[in-house]
Image (tube, rainbow, N blue to C red):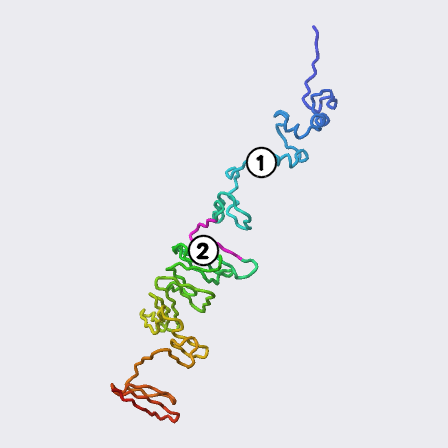
Amino acid sequence: MMTVAISPPVRSHSLLADLTEDDHLQYLTDGRFDTRFGSKTLTDLLNASAGDLDSGTLLDARVSQSNVTQHQAALSITESQISDFGSYLPLTGGTLSGVLTATTLVSNGNVFANGQLVVSNTVPSIFFKDTDIVDKDVRLFVNSGRLFLRSINDDETVVTTPWDIDTTAPTNTFVMGSNGLATFNQGLRVSAGTTTILDVMNVSGATTFTGTTTISAASPKLDFFDSNTTDKNVRLFCNVGFFTIRNYNDADNTETIPVTLDSNAPANSLYMTALGRVGIQAGSSPDYDLEVGGSIGFAPGSSVTPADNGDVVFELTNNTTFTVKAKGSDGVVRSGTITLS
């Protein structure tokens, strides 16, 4: 019988002999890696099979920008694919420039929809801030069916409202043409400088009209209100071919008509020259302080006394006596009578 001695197995890696010997080609060394992959291009690596590239990260030097951007047209990323998309809205600063072409862009309750700005809020407003000038800002806002344009300072402690437009105003209430002419729709109520709207146009303070101003209505009128009184106002009024100057009392809505002009009256019916001379149907060049071209009729009182020196008055004393009285420079009133039969 033969006896064979068997050495105990090696249980430690450090006890293995000849580890430095490269006698197995399947061992992957640094040299064999460089030989196999070092000369490969990015295309070779991208076309490698899944078994060749199944882990790890490509070095930056192996991937150029053009290798990525050439495929960007094929990329399609939606809002739902961006997990933190909501953190970028609403917009909190910066400016929007150019043309908005997105179907819908939401910012602070404002919606840019198909190129239109929609401001949706309980009191929607648009703020225009001039960074070059302090306290010269403008705000447009809507409240309770009215559109306001306000001038405000930077901290909004001083506010004026030069424009207040009721959104129920009719179409073409105010139209400014390309020729600079403004048209106010009939029935329009415009108040300039006051919140009390009394008529078609109510202006408080000095007003200058340059060029032709046309008031067109069934019975057009122009009122001049004295803010110091309620019963000493003047109304210019036109109705059925008559032009009148009226004393208007807005306290009780009553009026008197001291002057009436018929639109069919002949030219120069009443004419006043630069010298203060007045002509009544006497052409455009009266020779006297008062010149009448035609008959004169008047109704003198029954007892009239001249007030100042040099005054002359006429008196119809009774049915048969016509009296002329004159007050001389000495203050004495002298008279003469004409007997009427």
- Residue sitting at 46 percent across and 54 percent down? 125
| For residue 90, above or below residue 215 | above
Instruction: Tell me if mark 2 has few (under 14), some (14-19) or many (20+) residues whose alpha carbon lies within 10 angstroms of its own.
Output: some
Residue 180 at what x, y percent from top left?
Answer: 48, 60
Which tag, 2 or 1, sits closer to the chain's start? 1
The region drawn magenta spans 117-129
- Quarter of the image containing the N terminus? top right
Residue 252 at what x, y percent from top left?
Answer: 31, 70
- Under circle 2, the secondary element is strand
Residue 272 at what x, y percent from top left?
Answer: 42, 76
Is residue 7 part of the magenta span, yes or no? no
Q: Which mark is residue 278?
A: none
User: Does residue 68 appear left or right of residue 87 in this picture?
Assistant: right
Residue 242 at what x, y percent from top left?
Answer: 34, 68
- Residue underneath mark 1: 73
- Residue underneath mark 2: 141
Cα distance in 3D space between marks 2 and 1 = 43 Å
| For residue 246, above or below residue 79 | below
- Under circle 1, the secondary element is helix
- Residue sitting at 49 percent across and 55 percent down? 127
Instruction: Tell me if mark 1 has few (under 14), some (14-19) or many (20+) residues whose alpha carbon lies within 10 angstroms of its own.
Output: few
